[in-house]
Each structure stands twice: as C-alpha cells, then as structure tokens.
Image: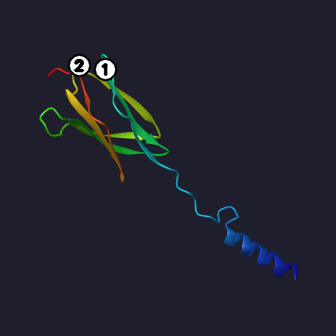
Amino acid sequence: MRKLMSAVGAGALLTAGLFVGAAPAQAAACTLVQSEIYNGANMIAWARGLEGCSGDVYWEIQSGDGGGWQVAESGTTHYDNQTVSYYGDVELPCYLRLYAKFGTQEKLTQPVRNYNCAG
C-alpha cells in the first residue's frame, strides 16, 4: 500500500510540476529599449539596447527635413543585455526621429529639432 501511495504521490507531484525539471523552462523577458531623444543645448542624445537577452537590433535615424520622413542612416547593432548611449549634433539631420526594431518589438521616438545641425 505504501508503494502505491508513493507512486500516486510522485505522479501528483509530476503533474503539478513540482519535481525539478518537470516544468518547462520559462523564457527570459526580452525588451527592446529605445529612449526618447534628449535635445540639449549642444548635443542630441539617446539610448538603445536590449534588456534580458542578446540579439541584433535594426535601427534608423530618420530625417524630416524634406516634408516627409526619409532614412538618413540605418544599421544593425548587436546588444548583449545592455543599453548604450549615443550622442551627436552637427552630423544629425535638422529634424529627426529614431526607429528601432527587434523581432516583433518596434519603437519610434517623437521628432525633435536639432538646432546644431549643419543645414
């Protein structure tokens, strides 16, 4: 009788996922980070990266100088559970916004005027 109860008890524990390895592993949350643009007196700054995972993030710096939005610069950067700060001024468009995509996550910042642009 004790063997039967032990087997029933173990079966109940397996069903409940209480034995180590019985429950499937939870995937870590992975979040795309794209801060809004900081428009300072002498610089433009922002942060981009991934929290909780590593991977390649596609990004664009978009220019709104011509009335519509055009891609001024784009690329792919690998982040390993990190957020990186970026800075610029004269090399950036006079009116810009940022776009970033990782998997199904997308971020688009509010546009800002760059008063230090070369245009």
Image x and y of residue 78, in percent = 37, 40
Q: Residue at x 41, y 38 (%)?
A: 49
Q: CA distance from mark 2 to mark 1?
A: 7 Å
Q: Quadrant of residue 57?
A: top left
Image x and y of residue 8, in percent = 77, 78
Label 1 sits on what residue type?
Answer: Met
Q: Residue at x 14, y 22 (%)?
A: 119
Q: Residue at x 23, y 32 (%)?
A: 96
Q: Earlier in the sequence, mark 2 or mark 1?
A: 1
- Residue occupied by mark 2: 116
Q: 80 or 113: nearer the eye?
A: 113
| Residue located farthest toward the right when viewing the structure as drawn | 1
- Residue occupied by mark 1: 43
Q: Residue at x 87, y 79 (%)?
A: 2
Which image quarter is the N terminus in?
bottom right
72 in relation to 19, above or below: above
Q: Quadrant of residue 6?
A: bottom right
88 in relation to 109, above or below: above
In contact (CB < 8 Å): disc 2 and disc 1:
yes
46 in relation to 40, above or below: below
Tell me the colour scheme of the image.
rainbow
Q: Residues within 10 Å of mark 2 (few under 14, many from 20)?
A: some
Where disc 1 sits, the SS reads: loop
Label 2 sits on what residue type?
Answer: Asn
Residue 86, which numbered label?
A: none
Q: 111 or 56: nearer the eye?
A: 111
| Residue located farthest toward the top when viewing the structure as drawn | 42
